[in-house]
Image (cartoon, coloured by chain):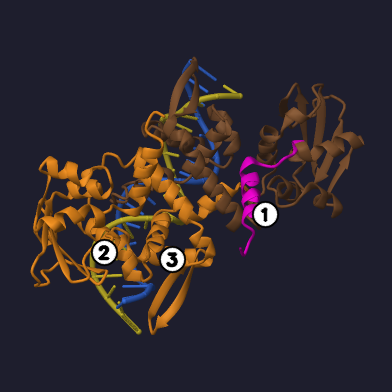
Chain colours: A orange, B brown, C yellow, D blue
Amino acid sequence: MTVGYRQFCPVAKAAELLCERWTLLVARELIAGSRHFNELRRGLPRMSPTLLSTRLSQLVASGVIRRSAEGPMQHAYELTQAGQELVPLIETMGVWGHRWVSKHLHDDDLDAGLLMWDIGRGVDSSVLPERRVVIEVELTDAPRDRRHWWLVSEAEHVDLCLEDPGHEVDLLIRATVRMLTSVWMCRLSLDEARDTGGLTLSGPERLKRLMPRWLIGSPLARLGAQSLVARPIGA
Amino acid sequence: MTVGYRQFCPVAKAAELLCERWTLLVARELIAGSRHFNELRRGLPRMSPTLLSTRLSQLVASGVIRRSAEGPMQHAYELTQAGQELVPLIETMGVWGHRWVSKHLHDDDLDAGLLMWDIGRGVDSSVLPERRVVIEVELTDAPRDRRHWWLVSEAEHVDLCLEDPGHEVDLLIRATVRMLTSVWMCRLSLDEARDTGGLTLSGPERLKRLMPRWLIGSPLARLGAQSLVARPIGA
DNA sequence: CTGCATCCGACGCGATACTG
DNA sequence: CAGTATCGCGTCGGATGCAG
């Protein structure tokens, strides 16, 4: 921003910093747990590295994050106290967005890679067996090189692969990108998705039944869905 | 915004709409009670009318506000349900800004006209006498044509004048723009401001003592100050 | 006075390529 | 891995004009 708003209002001063393009999404990624430059890039695939670099510098300069050395040319970004106190702001914005703008997504807003990256870091692996569990996800309408994904869960840690890791697949999930996004955004329950035939599961009954407990939806979407229950539309 | 973020995340979808330049401040003004184009302009003096018009159209298109006719070429903008639910977002942002960025204001952020406009609509006139009360404010360091202001309170309604309304002045307040801004932003109590000599009052003792009850500070700043009490720095 | 429309210059942003 | 360098475009800000 060339120049600020020239207002003493706290909202204006906060907006000067936070409402520049991409800034709030960088904060979201940091809150979600990303710490390294290229980790941030995975969550912000459409942001140019130049601009990410600029935004990180601005956030450091304004005291929202801190950059620490983890080795030669290896840095970690972490939230300061001011940054951690952005959590309620991001949450409030997520709830509002979930309720009022992201209900009907345009095709352009769907992104197979982003969805799988978000799922990979968001599944609750604690309810899965300790032993290795391999879940293959086939996004039926994605371009060939982004159609097949593997979630490998082991000892409560989940890895996401775009290439067949070679292990035997325990559970196969087939759905369109839009369908899986709807489920992940808590717009559609797993049962509803299966009933319409838009999402199919192949594997042992036990793993199928366990699924609603580990594919619990994006943290922000869960908040939004909660608030829908707490205050239904029209109330 | 030429193009969105291409993300399904509710924060991203909300940010596409709300985080464009000025948009959140337009929402703030509407929440503060402005309904007409030029009323909005008073609270956004640095925003070009062109851009205000554009933003209002965007907010109408996205269902945050609604434009209704009040006569020939006379319109009123009012918040829809979606718009009213932005209140917690603006408040959260204001509290964060008050705590982390607007503590030390640059000279450029001070604006006599904006300050007086905000005070004029924000004073609690219900504690003032029913009869007409005239309060003159002299901003000692403001340019000549913005140095003297009159707040005329009558029957719980307050008018702001930049020209002497002619009535006898009941109370005179003298301070720099920065000093009065600090008080209005709840950074400094009235007593502290008077003790340092930065703010002086002339008038009957009764009106002076009443002052902390009607000059109660900007709504957003009061929220911010509250949260400072609720959670002191460092806690 | 309200509620815009138009024109122009500046710069923030996106895309791509490249480096230590 | 962690960023820079470069360049073209589009959006924004400022000034001005104008109709009801």
Q: Is residue A11 left or right of residue A73?
A: right
Tell me which segment is drawn in magenta. Answer: B214-235
Q: Quadrant of the C terminus of chain A?
A: top left
Q: Is residue A166 visible?
A: yes
Answer left or right for B172 relative to B85: right
Query: Looking at this view, is B52 or C7 the one in front?
Result: B52
Tell me if residue D2 comes above or below residue B134 in the rendering: below
Residue situated in front as seen by the camera: B83 or A133: A133
Q: Which mark is residue A1?
A: none
Residue that mark 1 sits on: B107
Taking the spot 79% from the left edge, 29% from the top edge, the residue there is B128
Q: Amino acid at mark 3?
A: Leu
Q: Is residue B187 magenta?
A: no
Image coordinates of residue A45 in percent, x first then y, are 28, 60
Give residue B57's position: percent from left, percent from top: 41, 32
Looking at the rendered structure, the secondary structure element under dot 1 is: helix
Q: For mark 2, name the chain.
A: A
Q: Chain of mark 1?
A: B
User: Which amino acid, mark 1?
Assistant: Asp
* Residue A76 horizontal/vertical position (percent): 41, 74
Q: Which of the numbered marks, if any, corresponds to residue A56?
A: 3
**Is residue B187 toward the left or the right of residue B18 in the image?**
right
Q: Chain of mark 3?
A: A
Measured as percent of width and height from the top left, residue A107 is found at: 21, 45
Mark 2: amino acid: Ser
Q: In the rendering, which numbered label is found on residue A125? A: 2
Sort mark 3 into few (<14), some (14-19) or many (20+) by Cα contacts within 10 Å: many
